[in-house]
Amino acid sequence: MYYKKTRSLYQKGSEEPFKISRSKIDLFVECPRCFYMDTRLGLSRPNTPPYTLNSAVDNLLKNEFDLLRKKGEKHRLMDEYKVDAIPFDHPDLPQWRGEVTAYEGALALDEKSNLLINGLVDDIWQNSKGELMIVDYKSTSTTKEISLDDEYKQGYKRQMEVYQWIFRKLGFKVSNTGYFIFANAQKNLPKFDGKLEFAMSILPHKGNDNWVNLTLLEIKETLESDKIPEPSHDCEYCSYKKMSVESVASWKKSHS
């Protein structure tokens, strides 16, 4: 099913499904005020530079898994980490990745909130039970043991759980377990020789998407309100804006 594209800003009272990305859901979880300023008022957080090296690694991994997808074969990492799966072959995979229509991805409508959720997946595997497994590629460079316990990686988990929710809404049987493939650039090698060498690893995550439905209803309620939400207590962007306003006011007062 296809839905007419909506405007980028939410229009209060609109009956047309409003498209919202997975990243915007995460923004709402991080700070409802920043989300409201972005989606209702069009005042976004400053853009960060594109991670072009990460994109290059993503593309190379997709190419590598696509070769095996055509053959119906497992990747060596799947054997190494004892993952019961092969790359999932489906004609809509390029669309779900955003390779056909940029930023469209996989789309699922939440009927209760009338929000149209989209997400761009990196890969999908399928186990012997016929369940889909959401897979996300991550690039890093660290000498520490890679885990999903870091505070900023909680967003990784929410990302995967939103994708699991989307594909369940699309009618697929989805495993609770998804996988992160980490490409860890080695930086303690004796020579560079114009090449980056990566240590590859797979980390599983047992997702729980029960929070998604409630969060979408909260998002809808927030968007329908004319009251700007209070900032999250740990939002660095809101704290910076507040300090900037206070600093300017203090400077003007001292120089008046």
Image: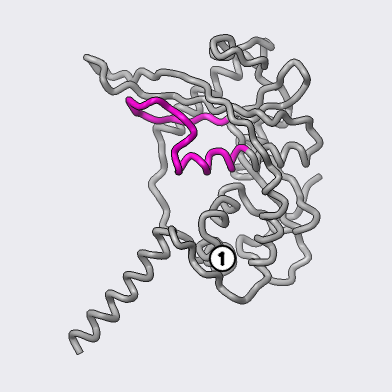
* Rendered position, 70 above or below 256: above
Q: Position of residue 231 (x, y in %)?
A: 49, 66
Q: In the picture, which quadrant includes the N terminus? A: top right
At 58% from the left and 18% from the top, the residue drawn is 65
- Relative depth, front residue between 158 and 71: 158
* Rendered position, 134 above or below 51: above
Quick one: SS at disc 1? helix
Give the left or right position of residue 204, taking residue 182 as reference: right
Residue stretch rendered in magenta on the structure: 136-160
Please name the residue that numbered disc 1 is placed on: 36
Give the left or right position of residue 245, taking residue 20 as reference: left
In the picture as drawn, the residue positioned furthest to the bottom comes out as: 256
Q: Position of residue 68 (x, y in %)?
A: 62, 13
Q: Position of residue 232 (x, y in %)?
A: 49, 62
- Relative depth, front residue between 127 and 41: 127
Q: Position of residue 124 (x, y in %)?
A: 65, 27
- Relative depth, front residue between 197 and 179: 179
- Kind of residue sitting beneath label 1: Tyr
Count of labels shown?
1
Q: In the picture, which quadrant includes the C terminus? A: bottom left
Does the stretch in magenta take in 91? no
* Rendered position, 99 above or below 115: above
At 75% from the left and 55% from the top, the residue drawn is 4
Task: Indicate the quadrant where residue 171 lies.
Answer: top right
Task: Indicate the quadrant where residue 196 lies.
Answer: top left
At 61% from the left and 60% from the top, the residue drawn is 8
